[in-house]
Amino acid sequence: MQIVPDWAPNIHPMIVHFPIVLLTFAVIFDFLFLFLKKFGWLEKSALSLYIVGTLSIIVTFFTGRFAADGLDIPAKVIPAVTDHADWAEITLWFFIIFSAVRLTIGLWKKQVHRAILFIITIIGFAGIYLLYQTADHGAKLVFGYGLGTGNILEKVEQMEKETKSDESISDSTLKLGTNGSWKLIATAQTVTILKEKFKWIESSIEDVSPMFDEENSAMMFHPQKEATFIYNDKIKSVQITAKINVDEFDGELEFIHHFNDNNNYDFLRIRNGEISLARKSHGQTKIFEKDKFADKGFIEIKVIGDGTHFRGYVNNKMIVHGHGSEPKPGSVGIRINGQGSFYLNSIDVISLRQ
């Protein structure tokens, strides 16, 4: 038996309205019972709705996260997805805590002063506001951007085509966009650009001996020791997409973002078939999440750092998704530490928010 019909991209849109309806009516019934004491069924119904509604919001939250993780989300939509996820998590924890308190009061209401019961019930309306905000941000994704409908990819692809037709895709190798966005394309001039336009941290360009490989249209790096280079623009929220080949490289390759200094930055690391999202804070490294991948040849790596959400993709498939405190705006770059040859075809950095 097919649980999810063909028209639905996943189960999330089929169940998302249950917690909205159940928890909204739970709060309304609770409020009415304060003034209509003779209708005891109002309180019993409210308590039942809190139980079922809270269970449904837990299921809805995790199906939503699973749905988002399974999509290759266009850069322009990522901030809206992050905002929706943040509101959903706040709403989830509110009702887990609030429902637990309300159910406890329901069991011991004779020992609870009526004024406290009134205040608790009024607080429940804050939950309705949170439900509204979560639903509103979710509706924006579907009706504003078409996420999950199949239309969004067509719209974004058309916008990208129009943008590319207006740009002169030349051999200038470094293209600067708005709000700190930039793109580096491997050409014969890339070595000069790396030397003159990028900042090298505790190392120099000579430490990686870069050269242009015309056959693969890629920069080939031969690291002699650890080297880090960044483009010194501060970005608040970022998506990095890079086409690389690490088949002949043995060591650590990090795509750095929110770089403030050598001891404070976030990064996606590739090492021996393992990909991880991590943060270096005051010199100490914390791993958000890690997993294995087995792709060979030239692959597309994508890392997103938006608010408290961090995602890592290999060939448009999300492999790791971590969470941490929102970092300060910072620069983007690459850290190379290992032996052998590392190939870079291009790196595209997009600023997601103003």
Image: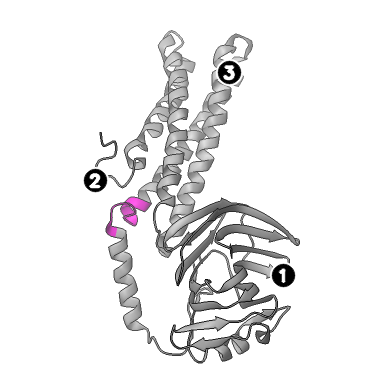
Bounds of the magenta span?
Answer: 141-151
Q: Residue at x 56, y 52 (%)?
A: 322
Give the residue number, with chain letter if any, for mark 2: 7
Circles 2 and 3 in contact, beta carbons < 8 Å = no
Give the residue number, with chain letter if any, for mark 1: 262
Front: mark 2 or 3: 2
Q: CA distance from mark 2 to mark 3?
A: 42 Å
Decide which of 315, 72 is in the foreground and name it. 315
Report x, y in % for residue 306: 53, 59
Q: Residue at x 46, y 10 (%)?
A: 37
SS at badge 1:
loop
Does residue 174 appear left or right of residue 277 in this picture? left
Q: CA distance from mark 2 to mark 1?
A: 49 Å
SS at badge 3:
helix
Report x, y in % for residue 59: 44, 34
Q: Residues within 10 Å of mark 3 (few under 14, many from 20)?
A: few
Report x, y in % for residue 45: 42, 17
Decide which of 118, 301 is in the foreground and name it. 301
Give the residue number, with chain letter if any, for mark 3: 104
Q: Residues within 10 Å of mark 1 (few under 14, many from 20)?
A: few
Q: Earlier in the sequence, mark 2 or mark 1?
A: 2
